[in-house]
Image (cartoon, coloured by chain):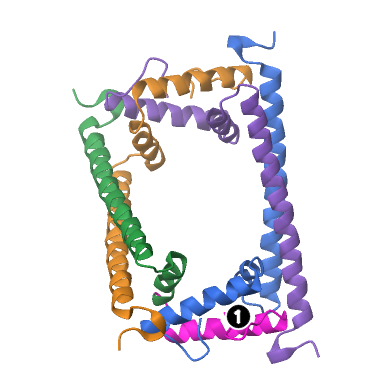
Chain colours: A purple, B green, C blue, D orange
Amino acid sequence: MSDPGGVAADQLRAFVERIERLEEEKKVISDDIKDVYAEAKGNGFDVKILRKVISLRKKQPHEREEEEAVLDLYLQALGMAVQGNM
Amino acid sequence: MSDPGGVAADQLRAFVERIERLEEEKKVISDDIKDVYAEAKGNGFDVKILRKVISLRKKQPHEREEEEAVLDLYLQALGMAVQGNM
Amino acid sequence: MSDPGGVAADQLRAFVERIERLEEEKKVISDDIKDVYAEAKGNGFDVKILRKVISLRKKQPHEREEEEAVLDLYLQALGMAVQGNM
Amino acid sequence: MSDPGGVAADQLRAFVERIERLEEEKKVISDDIKDVYAEAKGNGFDVKILRKVISLRKKQPHEREEEEAVLDLYLQALGMAVQGNM
């Protein structure tokens, strides 16, 4: 009998195994991403800035510009503006 | 003038400083918590289990019992039950 | 010219695109995992306990038993033990 | 007897209570921080940019400038530079 205590054991096992398989795939990809960053670093790129670039690429240009403008405003108000800025 | 570009500089500075002060206090407390765990470890307690205990204490006993019962059921269905359990 | 300011633009672009592709794949898998949990929930399983099961399966049985034994000890010392326990 | 199963119950209880008290204090401060951000938002400030300012203030100006310069370089190489930048 596959249903001790009211749990459909086969179904539960199937769910658990599907999740574990997907988590394993996800881990492989996460490791791949780390490898690419490591390779970029080995080629002289700054990993921290590279992450920043990847995150900025998810934004629309106008969104990025607006955020930058507000940030500049705040930094100037606080006397923190630098020549180029950020 | 304290309002370049439409930002109330004094007000902005006040918010920033209040946040920074609170973050500093929070960091001190976080460090205190780490210290207590370290002290407990130094007295032979298992820090990981101690964290588990702290988290279990946030639950009502009946809530804890119910979760435990369901977990036991699932583990049995998967052939993972151990004598005492968990 | 592909090298403004000393950056190998083609190489940078290649790294960025590889990372973005992998992140996209990772997101798809993360969504798949969420879907399986949702499906399990739809079939009457408790998602929180399911996550607990998945995490327990990563441990060796003896490791699990040892942790459980220490937890029981601590809970008893604190007067928090329940019949079955956890 | 305060030592069932070899655990110094009084000592364990003392550690648990110290940790819980500190976690409670930490929670109060975390809530205070949220309140200040909410108040800033109520006064027209952009919370996301405010967080960015707080994080930038933790860096030395020269550190910030260097990171900004590298970021500009990468964005230009990718054709993503905007007038002001970031």
The location of residue C21, given as percent across then percent down, is 72, 38
User: Residue at (65%, 74%) from the top-left corner?
Assistant: C61
The subunit letter for the residue under badge 1 reads: B
Foreground residue among B6 and A72: A72
Foreground residue among A27 and C32: A27
Residue D47 location, quadrant = top left
User: Looking at the image, which residue sits at the far top?
Assistant: C1
The location of residue D1, given as percent across then percent down, is 30, 89
The location of residue B82, given as percent across then percent down, is 63, 82
The location of residue D43, given as percent across then percent down, is 28, 43
Residue A5 location, quadrant = bottom right
Q: Amino acid at mark 1?
A: Leu
Q: Quadrant of the C terminus of chain A?
A: top left
Considering only vertical position in the picture, is B79 above or below B5?
A: below
Residue identified by numbered label 1: B71
Q: What's drawn in magenta, residue-wise?
A: B58-86
Considering only vertical position in the picture, is A83 above or below B66?
A: above
